[in-house]
Image: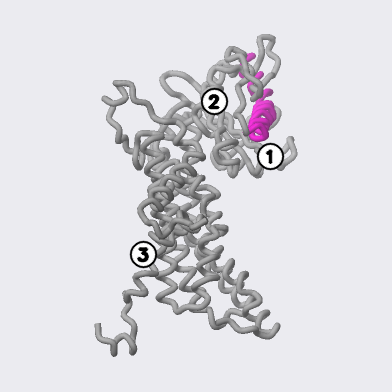
Amino acid sequence: MTKDYSNKYIFIYSSIMVVVVALILSLLATLLQPRQERNIRLEKMQDILASINIEVEREKSEVVFWDYIVDTKILNHKGEELEGDAFEVDLQDEIRKDLAERQLPLYIAEAEDEQYYIIPLRGAGLWGAIWGYISLKSDFNTIAGVNFDHASETPGLGSQIADKHFEDQFKGKNIFDQDGNYRSVRVIRNGVDPDDPHRVDAISGGTMTCNGVSNMMYDGIRLYKPYIQKQVNL
Amino acid sequence: MSTNAEISKEPLFSYKNKKLITNPIGKDNPITIQVLGICSILAVTVQLKPSLVLAISVVAVMGLANVIISLLRKTIPQRIRIIVQLTVIASLVIIVDQVLKAYMYDVSRQLSIFVGLIITNCIIMGRLEGYALYNKAWPSFLDGIGNASGYAAILIVVGAVREFFGSGTLMNVQIIPDALYAIGYENNGFFILPPMALITVGIIIWIQRSRDKELIDAS
């Protein structure tokens, strides 16, 4: 049976408890960190491959990744190439930087004699971060595939952005219109004509997350416009 | 069993101790009788695998939390006992979460926030407050394991039923043969949606009460 103790006892008791718990948890976190980071790295490879519609198991993604990814680049906002390893660029840090200092990773993939340009994206959903990869065909206009993921969107509602049926809607959509103006692809409520090249249907109950996807795509792909214009004019 | 032995030292699995495990699985089930922990039942039982992992996680957290609180029970000041209980549960949950992230990454992605939400599972706090705070470590451990198993049993049954009827699979292995699909059988998409979890739990409660008249409320 618990008794009532003095304030001094309570203070000391809770202080010791906090220190002990903190020690145990930080020790555990340090021990498990290498394995967790490896998982995250493998998942990133798996997601990038998924955006060009290649499904691999996570454990195997490291083996086949460089079979498909033939080149990586880091670009700046003017479309010039920078030095560095694109895979190590963390978008979470980059999107906080000024535009002039930002590093924009680009992955170039080759599958079945087709070239794909994969752009990583990151933005905000309803509750937390959302991110994804979008692959463009060699015309730099048609979307070959997308892969989205999220930190903490509402399960069953906003979380559906990571589901196949949502991602598949983006295939074949265009980011530029016929006159070459940048349009991106928007996620729209109230029904969408499936042939509209710049719109896809939103998720019922996940409107805020879908708006996040629209903004993430619009802001993310736009940064690559100078590079794309250089490539297309060549 | 001689009476002398019982007085000097109670056997580990005495009748009373066995009841601590079997009661919460059956007659005093935290879900079907006390109707606690429904929220997580709705959320994770679309497939058997996450149900199974959450069930194991809850058993581990609850068994350990009950033992820790029971061992500390004579030192815990009455006024901050809830905070101490929360700290213990929260730390154990973080440990489970970290281990899952390192060794079962896919499952941890699938369970996402629900591992964290073990903290708010009212069954755990209820057992700490109602049992472990006043009892020795071994019975508290059994009580924790028992109640968590009662929760786990329902979780697994509901998970199996929903995956079987909703996707035709169990543990992601196809169970319903292609031949059946060929003659027009279709998976029932309704089972994938949350309301079906509630209905399945309702049916389990119905079956349990119809077999055990003691459980029927007089009102």
Task: Based on the picture, tell me whether residue B162 belongs to the magenta stretch.
Answer: no
Q: Chain of mark 2?
A: A
Q: Which residues are magenta?
A: A206-234
Give the SS element for disc 3.
helix
Q: Quadrant of the N terminus of chain B?
A: bottom left
Q: Is residue A24 visible?
A: yes
Give the total of numbered labels. Answer: 3
Can see residue A89? no
Question: Residue B193: x percent and y percent?
Answer: 50, 36
Question: Which chain does the numbered disc 1 sit on?
Answer: A
Quarter occupied by residue A1 = bottom right
Q: Residue under circle 3?
A: B22
- In the picture of the structure, the residue carrying the numbered disc 1 is A95
Across and down, in percent, residue A159 comes to 56, 37
Distance Cα–Cα, label 3 vs label 2: 56 Å
Residue kind at label 2, given as amino acid type: Ser
Tell whether position A226 is magenta: yes
Whichever of callouts 2 and 1 sits on the residue coming sooner in the sequence is 1
Q: Residue at x 37, y 44 (%)?
A: B160
Using residue B43 as the reference point, say whether residue A153 is left or right of it: right
Residue A135 is marked as 2
Report the disc number at residue A194. Answer: none
Whether the residues at callouts 3 and 2 have beta carbons within 8 Å, the answer is no
Q: CA distance from mark 2 to mark 1?
A: 20 Å
Judging from the image, the colouring scheme is one colour
Check if mark 3 and mark 1 are on a common chain.
no
Q: Which chain letter matches label 3?
A: B
Q: CA distance from mark 3 to mark 1?
A: 55 Å
